[in-house]
């Protein structure tokens, strides 16, 4: 018997190499707060509210806070924020940190798929979890991660919708002759904190020198480099790089224009620096060197899929180029070069989009089936919730017994502290698991209706949309882009928005029912597939969370409709 026990101990020592090793050695956290503008930071008290809620969350969940980050204004449209990067550097290096606590996921980032990927990388590579105070979900399982990823995507979509509304308002302001952007070189805005219609521009000393420089350029006596040196010597510093941008700006001749006005000239309310005749004469001289300082155009309607589509073999994104008036997509520096006519790949993608379309006669039935399947999946976890409540009750009873034993001097203080900490941590984890079931699906039907409205004519909607709206529609349906299979001349994707991915199999259900099969029987064998931001998998328990899906009028893709569905 002793020999057998010894052999088992030796075997146990050998397999310890397979024991799971935690990435983090502590259960501590940091708090990150931010607002988007200096006005918000100074006036609306949001930072203080965020800090109070985050501190209360940490205290309630027994998470020691090691450091505070943010506390200032940083736009979340990109993840290159200075304070945000300082925070990421800190948590990656400090192995005691397990939690990044934020008031809301949009305080962490609004970059959509990039934010979801960053959160996933932090979790997988470092064992760090992003915890939202107002959206407390469990990201240790696929359902919770799906919910978090959908929050990131919809935060990004909400940001884009706000941007669209801002664009419309800015255009209207410019059409009235007001300049809504940064004050041009050579001017001072006396009311820069006011709305554009109240701005008051005056010409500065630098502006007076710039006026002389316009005259010098119009006379053709000095080249660009010499004029830059002339201005610098008189305290008006510009560079050769921005020389053309300044000298070709009609603002100096008293006009307002820009991309939003599509080149239309509007008489401005500001004082002109020079007369129109001198401005045109100076620019005629500039035209002798048409390529100097000319900005590169990145958005071309002919290649809306560039960087969105990747080569299936090399996984490299396709870029766009034009030759002999024909547009193409290609890969750069790959072992097997890919070169495909833009018209051809665009057509393949459009056909791929059409796979989500359906006959109008199926709309009501699709809506009913989709809602039934999503609701069924939403409430499949009720039994697990009951089991968790039972475990919580048992754990609370164990904690009470430990406290009772300590009060009766049956156990030492060390044992009391050891088991109290253990049971409290287990209780906290169980309650966090239970929290994910406190969901509200009241607006689910609205989200389904909007998805079906987009899908019905999605291919033609994509064709007629602007470049920017094409990009947003692509990202909405395929958050991680599309792969191009050159050999088989096909496009495919591994991940698709959950609602859109559900349409095709349900259409097959309806079509087979039309031929004689019962819907009830077909539903049993055709579950809505599990897709979305998670990899495509066989259908199982999945919680779907959607928000702000756009509903387009016929043939038009509109991004301004806000419907929130919180599940």
Image (cartoon, rainbow, N blue to C red):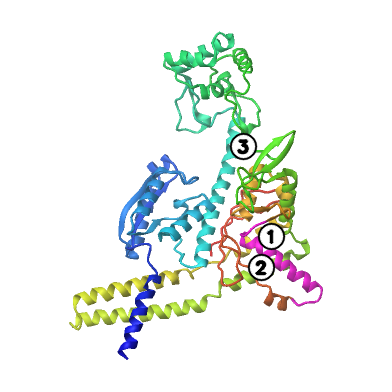
Q: Residue furthest right?
A: 515
Q: Nearer the viewer, residue 286 or 134?
A: 286
- Give x and y (percent) for residue 420: 28, 74
Q: Nearer the viewer, residue 280 or 94?
A: 94
Residue 298 numbered tag = 3
Q: Is residue 476 left or right of residue 341?
A: left
SS type, badge 2: helix
- For the record, the magenta segment spans 492-518
N-terminal of the pair, mark 2 or mark 3, is: 3
Q: Main secondary structure of the magenta part?
A: helix
Q: Could you tell me which quadrant the N terminus lies in?
A: bottom left
- Give x and y (percent) for residue 203: 48, 18
- Give x and y (percent) for residue 434: 44, 72
Q: Which circle, 2 or 3, is nearer the viewer?
A: 3
Query: Is 531 part of what is drawn in magenta?
Result: no
Query: Looking at the image, which residue is at 28% across and 82% down?
Result: 401
| 3D distance between C-alphas at marks 1 and 3 | 32 Å
The residue beneath circle 1 is 452
Q: Nearer the viewer, residue 347 or 488?
A: 488
Q: Is residue 101 visible?
A: yes
The residue beneath circle 2 is 370
Query: Looking at the image, which residue is at 62% across and 62% down?
Result: 498
CB atoms at circles 1 and 2 under 8 Å apart?
yes
Q: Residues within 10 Å of mark 3 (few under 14, many from 20)?
A: few
Q: How many marks?
A: 3
């Amino acid at each position: 018997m002793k020999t057998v026990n010894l052999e088992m101990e030796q075997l146990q020592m050998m397999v310890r190499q397979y024991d799971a090793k935690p990435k983090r050695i502590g259960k501590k956290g940091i708090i990150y707060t931010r607002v988007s503008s200096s006005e918000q930071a100074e006036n609306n008290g949001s930072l203080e509210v965020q800090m109070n809620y985050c501190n209360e969350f940490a205290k309630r969940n027994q998470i020691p806070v090691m450091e505070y980050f943010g506390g200032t204004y940083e736009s979340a449209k990109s993840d290159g924020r200075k304070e945000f990067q300082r925070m990421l550097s800190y948590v990656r290096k400090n192995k005691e940190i397990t939690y990044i606590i934020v008031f809301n996921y949009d305080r962490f980032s609004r970059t959509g798929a990039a934010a979801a990927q960053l959160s996933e990388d932090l979790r997988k590579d470092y064992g760090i979890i992003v915890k939202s105070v107002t959206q407390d979900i469990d990201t240790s399982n696929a359902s919770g991660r799906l919910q978090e990823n959908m929050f990131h995507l919809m935060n990004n979509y909400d940001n884009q919708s706000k941007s669209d509304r801002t664009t419309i308002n800015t255009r209207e302001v410019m059409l009235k002759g007001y300049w809504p952007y940064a004050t041009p070189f050579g001017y001072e805005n006396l009311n820069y904190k006011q709305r554009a219609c109240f701005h008051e521009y005056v010409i500065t000393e630098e502006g007076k020198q710039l006026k002389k420089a316009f005259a010098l350029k119009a006379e053709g006596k000095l080249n660009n480099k010499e004029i830059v040196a002339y201005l610098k010597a008189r305290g008006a510093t510009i560079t050769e790089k921005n020389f053309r941008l300044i000298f070709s700006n009609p603002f100096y001749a008293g006009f307002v224009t820009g991309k939003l006005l599509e080149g239309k000239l509007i008489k401005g309310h500001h004082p002109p620096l020079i007369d129109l005749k001198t401005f045109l004469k100076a620019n005629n001289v500039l035209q002798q060197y048409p390529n100097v300082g000319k900005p590169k155009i990145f958005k071309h309607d002919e290649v809306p899929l560039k960087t969105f589509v990747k080569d299936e073999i090399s996984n490299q994104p396709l870029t766009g180029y034009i030759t002999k008036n024909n547009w193409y997509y290609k890969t750069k520096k790959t072992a097997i070069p890919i070169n495909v006519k833009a018209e051809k790949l665009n057509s393949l993608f459009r056909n791929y989009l059409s796979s989500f379309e359906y006959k109008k006669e199926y709309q009501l039935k699709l809506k009913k089936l989709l809602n039934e399947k999503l609701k069924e999946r939403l409430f499949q976890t009720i039994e697990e919730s009951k089991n968790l409540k039972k475990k919580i009750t048992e754990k609370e009873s164990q904690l009470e017994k430990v406290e009772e034993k300590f009060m009766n001097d049956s156990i030492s203080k060390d044992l009391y502290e050891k088991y109290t900490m253990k049971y409290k941590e287990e209780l906290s984890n169980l309650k966090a698991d239970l929290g994910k079931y406190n969901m509200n699906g009241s607006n689910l039907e609205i989200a389904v209706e909007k998805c079906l409205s987009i899908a019905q004519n999605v291919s033609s909607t994509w064709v007629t949309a602007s470049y920017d709206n094409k990009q947003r529609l692509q990202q909405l349906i395929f958050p991680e882009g599309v792969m191009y299979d050159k050999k088989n001349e096909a496009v495919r994707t591994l991940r698709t928005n959950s609602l859109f991915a559900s349409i095709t199999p349900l259409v097959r259900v309806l079509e087979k029912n039309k031929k004689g099969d019962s819907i009830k029987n077909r539903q049993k064998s055709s579950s809505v597939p599990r897709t979305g931001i998670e990899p495509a998998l066989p259908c199982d328990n999945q919680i779907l969370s959607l928000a702000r899906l756009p509903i387009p009028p016929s043939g038009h893709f509109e991004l301004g409709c806000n419907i929130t569905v919180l599940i």
